[in-house]
Image (cartoon, rainbow, N blue to C red):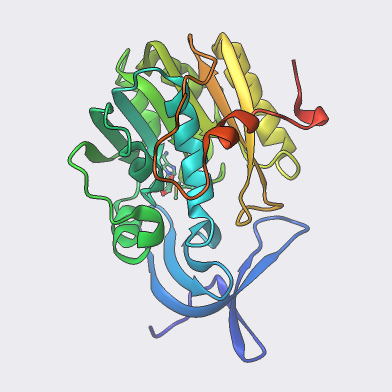
Amino acid sequence: MNEMPKFLQKIGQDWWLVEDERENMKISYRIKDIIFAAPSDFQHVMILDSYDFGRMLVLDGVVQTTSLDGHIYNEMITHVPLSIHPDPKRVLIIGGGDCGAAHEAAKYSGVERIDMVEIDEMVVRVCKEHLQDVSGNLSDPRVHFIYNDGIEYIKQHKNAYDVIIVDSSDPIGPAKQLFERSFYENIREALKEDGLMVCQSQSPLFHREVMKQTVHHIEELFPISKIYIATVPTYPGGFWSFTIGSKKYKDLVVKNFDKETKYVNESILRSCFDLPEFLRTK
Ligand code: SAM
């Protein structure tokens, strides 16, 4: 590599990734090695090897997922909705380029087809090759990779999916519209009449406005909505939220959770809906 990517800074003898998207907070990671770095048509893509988090996917200088804790996020965004829907057959993932959510969804033998609509082919390619702790080098014939903008794709599908997982990056760049009301309206139309959706709704502490707005859209558009939480150390503050919008089902149907996982188990599937007082809206 001739030139260091602009997101890396030399401090003393070491190279650091300095996340500085926030005005008043910078998060820095000491880097061992740059495994991949290049601009795609949509964003700057890096796979870095770090000291504490292992390998990490970094888009436009922001860490998306890591070897250390990618499984926590991906298991939580996937197994919760797939344990509420009693018979999910068709699953759509929007975003999710690290392939972790698709890898988890493929653990359900009843799922017949998983469509993954990711805007950036480069993210999928480098995660399959260099971030296998998260992607599992996914190659399941039920997974269909569709390289398209999720905003456009969703407009063209009606009454088609049992479960939709919105696994987006932060609401900047190509993911901005994935947090808007019109997108969730189209998601509702793309779901079957008993379908349900989930999205990552950001940090309850550091992204209060984005979270409030996302939850509000989902509450308005779906008869059943639920927030759940998990601790994902990679994300600012570690305390992370997910929001479900459901047309019909609200209770976990899981009796004996039998998927091979590193984080999720039956008791986490139940307790993740226990919210601190400030998040209890109903
Ligand atoms: N788990 C991570 C997090 O919460 O930060 C993010 C998962 S994944 C890496 C997010 C993916 O969404 C990225 O690969 C990005 O390319 C993709 N993405 C962003 N905007 C998109 C859009 N409009 N349509 C489809 N995929 C999009």
Q: Which residue is at a point 59% across and 34% down the rendered structure image?
A: 267
Compared with 68, 274 (above or below) is above
Q: Is residue 173 visible?
A: no
Relative to residue 274, is residue 144 depicted above or below?
below
Tell me where residue 190 appears, x and y as whole percent. 36, 17
> Residue reaching furthest right?
277
Q: Residue furthest front?
A: 256
In percent of the image, x 30 and y 39: which residue is there? 106
Of residue 77 and residue 210, the one placed in the foreground of this image is 77
Left or right, 190 with reference to 174: left
Would you say residue 121 is visible in this rendering? yes
Residue drawn at the location 63% of the way across and 27% of the way down: 227
Q: Quadrant of residue 52?
A: bottom right
Percent x, y for residue 217?
60, 20
Rendering quarter of residue 16: bottom right
Residue 68, given in percent of the width and then of the height, sits at 52, 61
In the picture as drawn, the residue positioned furthest to the left comes out as 141
For residue 195, above or below residue 277: above
Count of residue discs: 0
Q: Quadrant of residue 96?
A: top left
- The front one of 277 and 171 is 277
In the rendered structure, the answer to whether residue 21 lies left or right of residue 137 reads: right
Question: Which is more toward the observer, 199 or 72?
Answer: 72
Say whether residue 258 is left or right of residue 212. Answer: left
The residue sitting at 55% across, 24% down in the picture is 244
Left or right, residue 274 beside residue 258: right
| Rendering quadrant holding ligand 1 | top left
Question: Where's the N terminus, which quadrant?
Answer: bottom left
Q: Position of residue 146 (x, y in %)?
A: 25, 39
Q: Is residue 12 above or below residue 126?
A: below
Which of the image's four quarters has the C terminus? top right
